[in-house]
Amino acid sequence: MSNPVVVIGGDAVAAGDAPVLRQLAMQRRVGMFNTFAAKGLFAWNDPAHLGTIGLQADDLDLAGISDTEVLLVGVSDDEIGRDWLRSVGALWRDVTVAELDASLVVNEVPTPRPALYEALAAVCGPMYTSDAVPMNPARAAADLAAWLPDGGVVQARRDVAGFWLGRTLPTRTLGSIRFGPDSAQHAAIHIVSDHPTADHPTADHPHADHPHADHPHNIVEVWSADGPLLTAGERIARLQRAIEGRDGAVLQLGIDVGALDAFVAVAGRPLWPRLAGFVV
């Protein structure tokens, strides 16, 4: 008897179910996908972490969800649309944590990593170690995760920069990255895209202006094609100076926008930039 595919969403995290889900994953040797709203449920290198799902058009196919039983725990339609699941023939149902517990058996061997995880890792690996300038966004995301101070939070919108963070930020702890409308919270690193279409209001981001660095340790980093060309070391040193300055800062960073093509080739068009009016 094989276990179904398990996808964990933001509502499960908000309900405080993360410890129970981690215990289930360990006891049953079951891997789990997370949506963008549940990033950090498992550390990026935890064997139970099958990857973040729902960000690109081919995610469900690469995750092996087509014509498969899928259990959704706290997954909103905003994270993974039910129409999308139906279109690939997924036999999905929403379950509570208790129902998930009752549905899982103990795997003889841990859940293998899916094609989605392996394909994305193959693209991310070279980007994470690249010293090319302009910096690719995956390297920018990985360096940000490694540098982020304890208790720090990365805040992102669902724009092009947010897509990169959702796809490539190696999470260490739950809650270290949050997506959605801007929040006036302390110790936050806001990452936003300076793509022209970001100037137009969207349902997710009704205000066109960038977040303000109006709190101590509240830093805004704006990613764009024409920002300053910094090395990885220069960029992190600048972030460190900004956070030590205690007055907040708005920083510009030049990135390689063409790097997106490699992810499109693997997993199809990004869904968030499309929703924001961005066309790949």
Image (tube, rainbow, N blue to C red):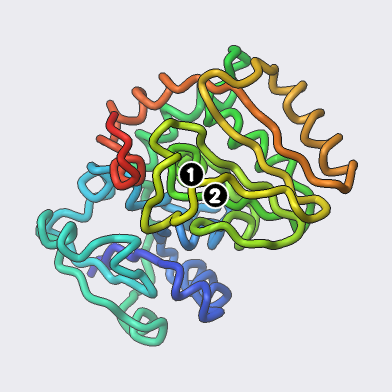
The reply to whether residue 215 is in sight is yes
Q: In the rendered view, would you say 143 is above or below 216?
A: above
Q: Secondary structure at mark 1?
A: helix
Q: Horizontal and vertical percent for residue 149?
A: 78, 49
Question: Could you tell me the amino acid type at mark 2?
Answer: Ala
Q: Horizontal and vertical percent for residue 242?
A: 82, 38
Is 56 placed left or right of 249 in the picture? left
Q: Residue at x 51, y 81 (%)?
A: 15
Q: Residue at x 45, y 31 (%)?
A: 195
Query: Where does label 2 land, which residue?
Result: 156
Where residue 186 sits, quadrant-wise, is bottom right
Between residue 116 and residue 86, name the one nearer to us.
86
**Tag 1: Cα neighbours inside 10 Å, few (<14), some, or many (≥20)?**
many
Q: Quadrant of the N terminus?
A: bottom left
Q: CA distance from mark 2 to mark 1?
A: 5 Å
Q: Quadrant of the C terminus?
A: top left
**Tag 2: Cα neighbours inside 10 Å, few (<14), some, or many (≥20)?**
many
Question: Could you tell me the amino acid type at mark 1?
Answer: Gly
Query: Where does label 1 land, which residue?
Result: 162
Whether residues under marks 2 and 1 lie with C-beta atoms below 8 angstroms apart, the answer is yes
Q: Horizontal and vertical percent for residue 178?
A: 56, 57
Between residue 81 and residue 95, name the one nearer to us.
81
Between residue 266 and residue 240, name the one nearer to us.
240
Quick one: which residue is furthest to the top in this view? 132
- Closer to the N terminus: mark 2 or mark 1? 2
Q: Residue at x 37, y 52 (%)?
A: 202
Q: Residue at x 20, y 46 (%)?
A: 61
Q: Secondary structure at mark 2?
A: strand
The reply to whether residue 115 is in sight is no
Q: Horizontal and vertical percent for residue 191?
A: 59, 42
Q: Which mark is residue 250?
A: none
